[in-house]
Image (cartoon, rainbow, N blue to C red):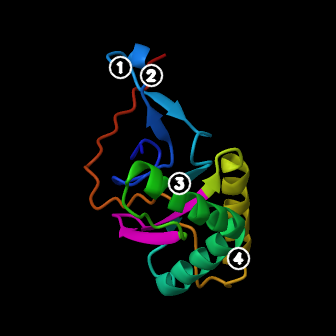
Amino acid sequence: MECGVWVKADQYNGRVVRVANSFVFKEPVYNYSGDFNFLWDEISIPVKYGSDYKLARDLFKRIADEITAEYTKGAKESWEEMKKKYLIEDAAIEPMVFLVANDNWMEFTIRYVVDFKKRRVTKNLLYNRILDEIEKTEGRIAIASMTVHIVETPTFEVKIARDSK
């Protein structure tokens, strides 16, 4: 079971790495549709400091639960078979929301399972629904963007050359 690549931290991304005999010393073979038809995926939402971070977490979790419910159910069933077949540990299938405080904003990462064929569509649904729901909070949650704060500026000396005609 592959870890990392497009998901943060050392967590499963859902791809099973198979190595064919002819490739043993060459390269791994990735299979999106072999034994486990789901992937773990993540999206990140930058939220302004001063926003209601508890409301944001709850909102993001609810949206992820609703949009990925069908995939979560299927992935749970499939994961049970994976654990038996490959003797691997159990993994969290339910959507999760993680928070990191950065220099400029609070970054929420939503981790969820998705059918490998519906990854991009699901990501789009999540972003659209999140933006729609944030608008309904009437400013309690606000999307962050890069802000530059200039603490001190150097002295500028400007010389203008005059035309001596």
For badge 1, the amino acid type reads: Val
Write down the region rendered in magenta.
96-113
Whether residue 20 appears in magenta in the rendering, the answer is no
Contact between labelled residues 4 and 1, with CB atoms less than 8 Å apart:
no
Q: Looking at the image, which residue is at 57% across and 45% down?
A: 35
For badge 2, the amino acid type reads: Ala
Q: Looking at the image, which residue is at 37% across and 68% down?
A: 100
For badge 3, the amino acid type reads: Trp
Contact between labelled residues 2 and 4, with CB atoms less than 8 Å apart:
no
For badge 4, the amino acid type reads: Glu
Image coordinates of residue 123 in percent, x first then y, are 66, 55
The residue labelled by disc 1 is 24
The residue labelled by disc 3 is 40
Query: Main SS of the magenta segment?
Result: strand
Q: Nearer the viewer, mark 3 or mark 1?
A: 1
Residue 45 at least partly seen: no
